[in-house]
Image (cartoon, grey):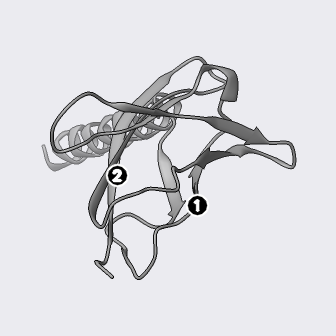
Amino acid sequence: MRRASDRRERALLFYLVVLFGFGLGISGAAAHSRLVKSDPSARAVLDTAPKELKLWFNEGVEPAFAKVWIVPAKGAQIPLTSHGDSSNPRLLLVALPDNLPAGPVVIGYHMLSVDGHTVDDKLTFTVKAP
């Protein structure tokens, strides 16, 4: 009787390991592009307003389909111009306006990755008052 019970336990353990392995494989394959680094970094507090924002993603992005904007506290979004970096397909460079005000700066973005998935998110940094 003990042998049948041991075999069932081993079979159950085997099936659980297989299912867990499939789950890991599927989650890796289903992963989408995401922001992995920015300069200035999210939540940074800066002495002076930057002239450019750099966004690095975990996979290549399509710069022609990128949309980046400032989300003001009041009023309409302020569109920003961006372009890719020929030496790094995972990097997007965004020009920031010269008159960036002191205080929190919220940047929204919509990206199309080279695998066809879109990324929509925001990041915030703060510019200190002079």
Secondary structure, mark 2, is: strand
Front residue of 79/98: it is 98
Q: Position of residue 114 (x, y in %)?
A: 67, 25
Name the quadrant containing residue 105: bottom left
Is any part of residue 97 visible from this angle? yes
Q: Is residue 26 left or right of residue 65?
A: left
> Which is closer to the viewer, label 1 or label 2?
1
* In the depicted structure, whether residue 4 falls above or below residue 112: below
Residue 123, disc: 2
- The N terminus: image quadrant: top left
Is any part of residue 62 visible from this angle? no
Kind of residue indicated by mark 2: Leu
* In the depicted structure, whether residue 8 falls above or below residue 40: above
Front residue of 116/110: it is 110
Kind of residue indicated by mark 1: Lys
Callouts 1 and 2 close, C-beta under 8 Å: no
CA gap, disc 1 and disc 2? 16 Å
Q: Position of residue 122 (x, y in %)?
A: 33, 44
Q: Residues within 10 Å of mark 1 (few under 14, many from 20)?
A: few
Q: Residues within 10 Å of mark 2 (few under 14, many from 20)?
A: some
Q: Is residue 64 left or right of residue 12?
A: right
| Disc 1: which residue | 51
* In the depicted structure, whether residue 16 falls above or below residue 99: above
Name the quadrant containing residue 77: top left
Front residue of 68/96: it is 96
Q: Is residue 90 left or right of residue 99?
A: right
Earlier sequence position, callout 1 versus callout 2 = 1
- The C terminus: image quadrant: bottom left
Q: Position of residue 11 (x, y in %)?
A: 31, 37
Secondary structure, mark 1, is: loop
